[in-house]
Every structure is written in C-alpha cells, then in structure tokens.
C-alpha cells in the first residue's frame, strides 16, 4: 500500500493519475463522502457519494480504514475494495492528507509506504495555488496557511519527493514502488525459491 | 553505501559495471589483496595489489572497513577511498560476499543498503558456471556448492533482485538506489527546505 500526501498545489493528483496510467498493478483507493458532487464529478470515480445515514452505518460496522469530518462533510476510505485488491496481489494507492495517513499507518504499519510530495519552492507553490482559480487574496492566503500546516507533517513519511518536473517526480515515485516490491520481506515464496536454487528440493 | 552480493554466476559483476556506467554519482570500492594479479588484471582497477607486510600494517592501523583471508590470500576494503567518496556526497558500491557484508553492516548499519542478486533457476546458474571456463566436473560441482552456501545468506539482505534479464536486473537495482536516496532520513537540508516552503524563514 502506497500513500501519497502533499499540500494542495504540489502536484499529488497529477502524479497519482500518471502512476495509475503507467502501472498495471496499481489500483487507487476511492474515498466515500457525504458532500454533494461538484460539477463534473463522477460517482465511483472521483468519490463514492453516499448519504450521511449510509456513512454513519459504515462507521458503525467498521467498514472504513480511516474517516474524518471536515467542515461538516464526512470522508472515509472503504476497507472492502482495498482488501480485495490486496488479496488479488495488487498494490493500492491512497491520495490522502496527513491525518488519514496516520490513521491507516496505525492499522497496517509495515505494509504502508508513505511518500510526501513537496513543491520546489514557496513561490512556485503560491503560483500553482493562484493558477487553480480566480480566488480572492484571502482564499489564497488561507490555502497557503493550510499548505504550511500539511507540510509540517513531512516528518511522518518514509520518502520525500520534490516535484520540480512532473515527469521526474513520477519516475521517482515509480522507483520507490519498484524498490519496495523488491524488499526481501515483500517477496512471497522467496524461501522456497532459494531452497530450490540451492538444490535442496526438486523444484526450480 | 550499496552492497551487492550474489553467488558467482548470478551476474553481480556485470550488474555492477552497468550501474557504474549509468550512474555518475556512484563510485565502486576497490579491494586490496595480497594475491598476485591474474593475467589482464590492472592494479588500482581490479584490485590494489599489495604485499603481505603492507596488508598487515593496514590491518594494524585499522585502515580496512573489513578484511578476510581465503586460501592464504588476504582481501580487504580500504577505508580511506570510501570515506573520501562519502564526504564528497557520492554513493559507494561494494561488490562483496556475505562475510564482508556482515562486517561492514556491523560498522555502519543504517547507511548500508544490502542487495542480494539471485539467478533465475538452478539450471541457469549451472549453465553460467559451466560457460565461464572449461573446468572439470569436480570444479563445477565445487562452485555450485559454494553458490549454495552463499545463497543461504539471502536473508541478511534488504532487497532481493532475481537476474532473469540483465537489463531488467540493472533497472531494478537503479530503482533501489533512487528510492533509497529519496528516503527522508537521507535528504540533507530537508528541515531547512520545508521551513522555507512554509514561509518560516526568508529563504526558498
């Protein structure tokens, strides 16, 4: 399981999209939310849009890996699709803030690889936040403050990727995925494979 | 510091050579030995060929990171070039067996990334060992036994790369290098960089 976090404006969503495009073994975890869809958002693609009652029920039944309520809207990561993907031998990508990361890490620990994406500079971050929409100065300053809060948690992650060029950043995250899959403890059947190589069994 | 180990015949030396060719930031550690050069071997390239007296003196002065004596010949990893490369911000590659890896790991611990290369199958390993030279069946069986011993230590390594195709194996080791360089604890100046991003200093 790979979690990507970053302040908004650092390019996390673009990086996620490109990773999924290039890596057939990767599935993205789609969150459930009680907030209404925005124009263009598709149910089951951007989010699972569900009622407050349904959300509450899922919380009660412990069907979320993590969940939180922000400005009156609830968000959660449904367990089932994640477990199904992992059982099928697939890796799961989470696009998530530091709170969600902490909650999931608390549950799965060694199975979670945490990557934090940083913008190349404060000016560049501000530019990217301004480009997003024609918002008032207040809104932009508010976003910068939230970005600063989010970045204060970089220390809770395993890897740091600085997104200078998007292509390089994607390649770096791919290298992290490749390397993590090569870790001894993640290689299923390794013991039997080495025994066979050593001629200690009849296989290989 | 990256150490590659494998039974002979798994392709470690070719992988090392290709890594060095592609990665300008990587230096290989050259061992010192008391054994005489074989035809074609170059002093300071394949090994530093030194006298037994000099070797003994270096052991006394603790100028080796690790050393061992095999069949009457001594081999050691000189500390100085490694320290110089690391100080210059370069990564150091060691081509080394499990004993050497254990000795170095005992000294540097977290700074050492240990990669074990495995052949794709027992038959393939035997083929590669046979190709090497027109040796007697005894010599080949002896080599297979040594390869088996070496492979018994795969569990002391962080990453396992199975060398099916050399190009893929090299790419996998490169991904390991890239990922390890992105680890939070290896990123020098990260604290100051994030502070600047957050607007907590005047830099960035």
Image: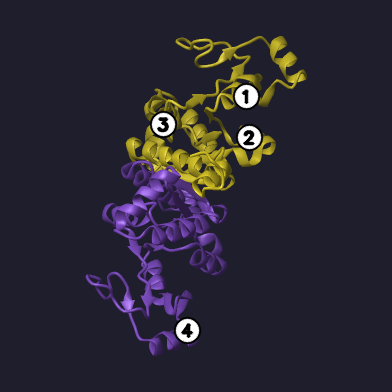
Chain colours: A yellow, B purple
Distance CA(mark 4)–CA(mark 1): 55 Å
At a point 61% along the width and 35% down the height, the residue shown is: A101
Query: Are discs 2 and 4 located on one and the same chain?
Result: no
Residue tagged 2? A99
Of pointers 1 and 3, the one earlier in the residue sequence: 3
The image quarter containing residue B8 is bottom left
The nearer-to-camera label among 4 and 1 is 4
Q: Tag 2, which secondary structure?
A: helix
Distance CA(mark 2)–CA(mark 4): 52 Å
Residue B198 seen in render = no
Residue A175 seen in render = yes
Q: Tag 4, which secondary structure?
A: helix
**Residue B59 has which mark?**
4
Question: Badge 4 sits on which subunit?
Answer: B
The nearer-to-camera label among 3 and 2 is 3
Residue A86 rendering spot, x and y as whole percentages: 58, 27
Distance CA(mark 2)–CA(mark 1): 21 Å
Q: Tag 3, which secondary structure?
A: helix
The nearer-to-camera label among 3 and 4 is 4
Residue tagged 3? A15
At a point 40% along the width and 41% down the height, the residue shown is: A172
Q: Is residue A50 left or right of residue A135?
A: right
Residue tagged 1? A83
Of pointers 2 and 1, the one earlier in the residue sequence: 1
Question: Badge 3 sits on which subunit?
Answer: A
Question: Badge 2 sits on which subunit?
Answer: A
At a point 67% along the width and 27% down the height, the residue shown is: A65
The nearer-to-camera label among 1 and 3 is 1
> Pointer 1: residues within 10 angstroms few (<14), some, or many (20+)?
few
Of residue B112 and residue B167, the one placed in the foreground of this image is B167
């Amino acid at each position: 399981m790979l979690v990507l976090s970053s302040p908004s404006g650092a390019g996390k969503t673009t990086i996620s999209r490109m990773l999924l495009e290039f890596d057939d073994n990767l599935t993205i975890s789609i969150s459930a939310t009680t907030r209404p869809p925005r124009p263009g958002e598709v149910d089951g693609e951007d989010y699972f849009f569900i009622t407050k009652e349904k959300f509450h029920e899922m919380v009660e039944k412990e069907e979320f890996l993590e969940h939180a309520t922000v400005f009156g809207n609830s968000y959660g990561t449904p367990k089932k699709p994640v477990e199904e993907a992992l059982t099928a031998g697939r890796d799961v990508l989470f696009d998530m803030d530091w709170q969600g990361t902490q909650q999931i890490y608390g549950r799965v620990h060694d199975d979670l690889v945490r990557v934090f994406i940083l913008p190349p500079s404060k000016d560049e971050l501000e530019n990217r936040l301004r480009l997003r929409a024609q918002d008032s100065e207040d809104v932009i300053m508010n976003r910068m403050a939230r970005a600063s809060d989010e970045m204060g948690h970089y220390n809770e992650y395993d890897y740091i990727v600085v997104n200078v060029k998007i292509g390089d950043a994607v390649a770096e995250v791919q290298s992290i995925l490749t390397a993590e899959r090569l870790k001894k403890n993640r290689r299923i059947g390794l013991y039997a494979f080495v025994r066979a190589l050593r001629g200690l069994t009849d296989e290989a």
